Amino acid sequence: MGAPKHLLEIDGVSMLERVVRALRDSRAGRITVVLRIGDDPGRVLAEALGVPWALAAEPQRGRAASVRAGVEAAEGGAAGLLFALADQPYLLPSDFDSLIDAFASDPRGIVRATYAGEPGSPVLFARRFFAELLSLEPGQGGRVVAARHSESVRNVPLDPHRGRDLDRPEDLSDRSPTTGSAACSGSRDGYSPPSMERTLAIIKPDAVRASQTGAILEAIEASGLRLIALRMLRLSRREAEGFYTVHRAKPFFDSLVDFMTSGPVVVGCLEGEGAIAAYRELMGATDPAQAAEGTLRKRFATNIEQNACHGSDAPETAAVEIRYFFRDLDLVERD
Ligand code: GDP
């Protein structure tokens, strides 16, 4: 976990504490903090949090030493081991639970988080891989074991904004709205469990034309998000330009407006815990070529522009976008 990087604070809460708290609020079982030798402040923090800690002996073995300490600390009966990094302080308990749920459906495999199609952390290993994890070469991490057993790896797409790691101290002060999604900004201002949110969803003209409205709504509902308003309309040029005004200077702006006005769209307001990030995760990356398996854009999008769906990216934009299409009276209360 490096020098004291994991003790750097985001709004008064250290990165390590954020990750421990998120794990505690997840369905993970026993948590152990793996520390480098000499990391007394890390040890003091782990003890203050009431979390067991283990030392990564043989520091010259680098990551292999941390992995070994984690495996050795695992409970005898543990079915699997999830490696979480202190430099991913924005992951939510629900992110860890997504991995744990995937693992529960195949408790002999490896479950790996992916971000916009790219493999990342955390990774969860079934017990049968523990021996291999213990015998990594110096400098190697669990990733090597996952690569060797690609047939056993199940990928779980998580929101890239929440999964981004903080490698440089200056990342901590990076609060530009373009680098954070809604759930991320929620968790940046002091870690808190996902709050009830609303987000705007648009089924774009390509998907409506291809009769995919029903399948997309079904996926939305199956994800647990609740529809609290829904309508079909055809955007005028002025309305489409107004909606995408932040992209006015982009080279693809005119083409985007042509596309968005080319046929009817279905616009909905969704509600749920952490709805903004949850829906973006369900949609997948903007470019379907980058979108993870099973996401709406992977399933239904044609290309980076005709990408089937839209979802708000932050609470502030969600509020504006919902108001763009719905009056307060249109938003119903669901039980
Ligand atoms: P989103 O939040 O994932 O929808 O992505 P953005 O806010 O960055 O872009 C808004 C929309 O513009 C996307 O959903 C696409 O329809 C379109 N778009 C984004 N990037 C490109 C691009 O590079 N080329 C084209 N033609 N369209 C793009």
Image (tube, grey):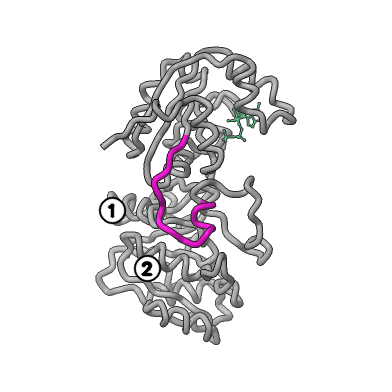
Task: Please report the residue visible at 60 percent of the width from the left and 61 percent of the height from the top.
Answer: 166
Mark 1 or mark 2: name the one nearer the start of the chain. Answer: 1
User: Disc 1 marks which amino acid?
Assistant: Ala
- Residues 331 and 161: in front is 331
- Residues 41 and 299: in front is 41
Residue stretch in magenta: 184-199
Task: Please report the residue visible at 48 percent of the width from the left and 26 percent of the height from the top.
Answer: 202
| Residue farthest front in this picture | 329
Give the quadrant of ligand 1: top right
Vertical comparison of 68 with 57: above or below? above
Is 192 a magenta residue? yes
User: Disc 2 marks which amino acid?
Assistant: Phe
Mark 1 — residue? 104
Left or right of 260? Residue 322 is left
Task: Please report the residue visible at 36 percent of the width from the left and 66 percent of the height from the top.
Answer: 24
What is the number of callouts on the image?
2
Q: Position of residue 242 (x, y in %)?
A: 63, 25
Q: Position of residue 66 (x, y in %)?
A: 49, 74
Is 173 a magenta residue? no
Vertical comparison of 263 with 49: above or below? above
